[in-house]
Image (tube, rainbow, N blue to C red):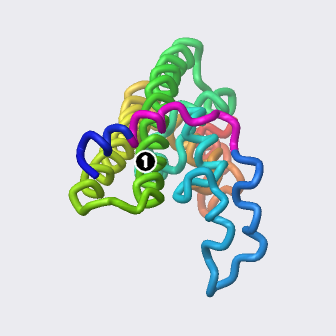
Amino acid sequence: MNRTVVAALLAPALGLSTVPSATADRSHGSQTAEQPYAGFESRSITSLSDDDIEQLRSGAGWGLALPAELNNHPGPAHLLENSDAIGLDAAQRTQVQALFDTMRADAIAAGERLIAAESALDEGFRAGDLTADDLRALLDEAVEAREALRFIHLSQHLRTVDILTEEQIARYNTVRGYADDPCAQVPEGHNATMWRLHNGCD
């Protein structure tokens, strides 16, 4: 197998059906510690579940932005979902919506690239004639595809902090369950009225 064949493996993978395999993951219930991958052989792509493929094709986060999400850099999708609770004004919603629309469009394209790369890896091993150089080329494409997708998600989290106030970021963390609600209980020794005012409880 040579570079031309590697390219041929990648090209048709881009045309994968958007309908998940009806038999994918059928044996998950029978997995054991000794057989952790039982059922994976029926997947359309062994390294991706049907849910993975669905998320990638919809532009969902797929957990790639957790370093931002859990470190005070809210994501556009969840900001829009919780806009009322966080207190976004009309201008902020418009800005966040623009970030989300860009992120989703770019993520869908990048997700298709990653799906194609993982499919090509499967096909390469299935063909049984991979060389080390072929494998390196396929892996490089898969790594680059995943990196590009992750950058798309993380970079939009970077931009949201310029739109939000510190209070809104704190409220986001509370709504998402990353921090305790400061309004739920006034700490001992604090004036209740001032505490609630300071923390935007009313």
Q: Amino acid at mark 1?
A: Ala
Regarding residue 154, the answer to whether it shows in the image is no
Position of residue 186 measured from the top left corner of the image (x, y, whole percent) = 66, 56
- 95 lies above or below 114: above
- 23 lies above or below 84: below
Judging depth in this view, the residue of 190 and 159 nearest the camera is 159
Magenta segment includes 16: yes
Residue ID at (66%, 31%): 81
**Within 10 angstroms of label 1, few (less than 14), some, or many (20 or more) residues?**
many
Judging depth in this view, the residue of 23 and 164 nearest the camera is 23
Q: Which residues are magenta?
A: 9-20
Q: Residue 49's quadrant in the figure?
A: bottom right
Figure quadrant of the C terminus = top right
Residue ID at (31%, 43%): 5
Left or right placement of residue 3 versus residue 186 in this view: left
Residue ID at (53%, 42%): 61
What residue occupies the far bottom of the structure in this picture? 34
Position of residue 94 measured from the top left corner of the image (x, y, whole percent) = 54, 14
- 193 lies above or below 184: above
Residue ID at (32%, 50%): 138
Left or right placement of residue 93 versus residue 114 in this view: right
- 90 lies above or below 48: above
Position of residue 117 measured from the top left corner of the image (x, y, whole percent) = 41, 45
Q: Which residue is label 1 attached to?
A: 120
Regarding residue 48, the answer to whether it shows in the image is yes
Position of residue 84 measured from the top left corner of the image (x, y, whole percent) = 68, 27
Left or right placement of residue 121 versus residue 5 in this view: right
Judging depth in this view, the residue of 25 and 1 nearest the camera is 1
SS under mark 1: helix
Judging depth in this view, the residue of 80 and 135 nearest the camera is 135
Magenta segment includes 174: no
Left or right placement of residue 152 versus residue 1 in this view: right
